[in-house]
Every structure is written in C-alpha cells, then in structure tokens.
Amino acid sequence: METKLRTADELAKQAALMDYVGPEPALGLSLANIKCEISQWSVQEQNKRWRNIKSCRQAKQYMQVVNIRLTHYAVRLSKKDFILFVGRTAELSAPKTAPFKFK
C-alpha cells in the first residue's frame, strides 16, 4: 500500500511539472472575458490619449470620450444615415457657446 502512495506522489509531482494538455481554456478564463478586458483597456487608452493630445480643440468640444456603443451603431449605418447621424450627434453635443447654429 505504501509503495502505491509513493508512486502516486511521484506521478503527481511529474504531472505538475509538465505542460498543460487538455481542453481549453487552461486558465479558467473564457475567450469572451479576455476580449472584453482587451476592449475595455483599449477604450481607456484611447480616452487617455484623447484627453492628453494638445491639438484637435474643436473636435474635442464635440467628442469628450470614445463611445463604443455609438461607434458600433454608426458603423452599421448606410452612408446616407451615417451623414444624418453625424449631423444630429454634432448638433446635440454642440457647446452652448458655438459660433453657429444648426438648422
């Protein structure tokens, strides 16, 4: 009985040193979770760069941060609808001190 336990211990130690072989995911993280984390990190980095850039003053008045939901929506629009969407979005986000008025 004791030799069986020793053999089992030795085999367990050997297995612990081997590379993982088996069904994915080996880390217990799903691909969806990893993609979501990367996407969130990407948006944070884009927003950080946008806030720190010294140029684009007028564009920054209308777009303070990256909005992924609006981006996905806009990408799916036809060209005609996209033009209307951009105009309406600019109109809604125009600062109160804008030197012009949208009609």
Image (cartoon, rainbow, N blue to C red):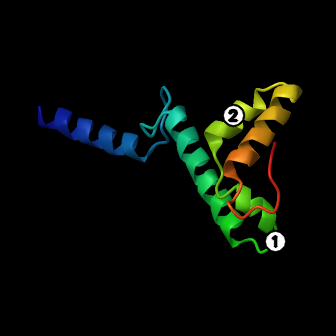
Which of disc 2 and disc 1 is earlier in sequence?
1
Q: Which quarter of the rendered picture does the N terminus lie within? A: top left
**Residue that badge 2 annotates:** 72
**Residue that badge 1 annotates:** 55
As drawn, the residue found furthest toward the right would be 79
Say what amino acid the circle numbered 2 marks. Answer: His
Is 52 situated left or right of 36 in this image?
A: right
Question: In the rendering, at what x and y percent does residue 77 appear?
Answer: 78, 26
Say what amino acid the circle numbered 1 marks. Answer: Ser
Question: In the rendering, at what x and y percent does residue 18 appear?
Answer: 46, 43
Q: Residue at x 66, y 38 (%)?
A: 70
As drawn, the residue found furthest toward the left would be 1
Residue 58 vertical placement versus 52 (above, below): above
Is 26 or 30 nearer to us in this picture?
30
Is 19 situated left or right of 16 in this image?
A: right
Is 15 or 4 nearer to us in this picture?
15
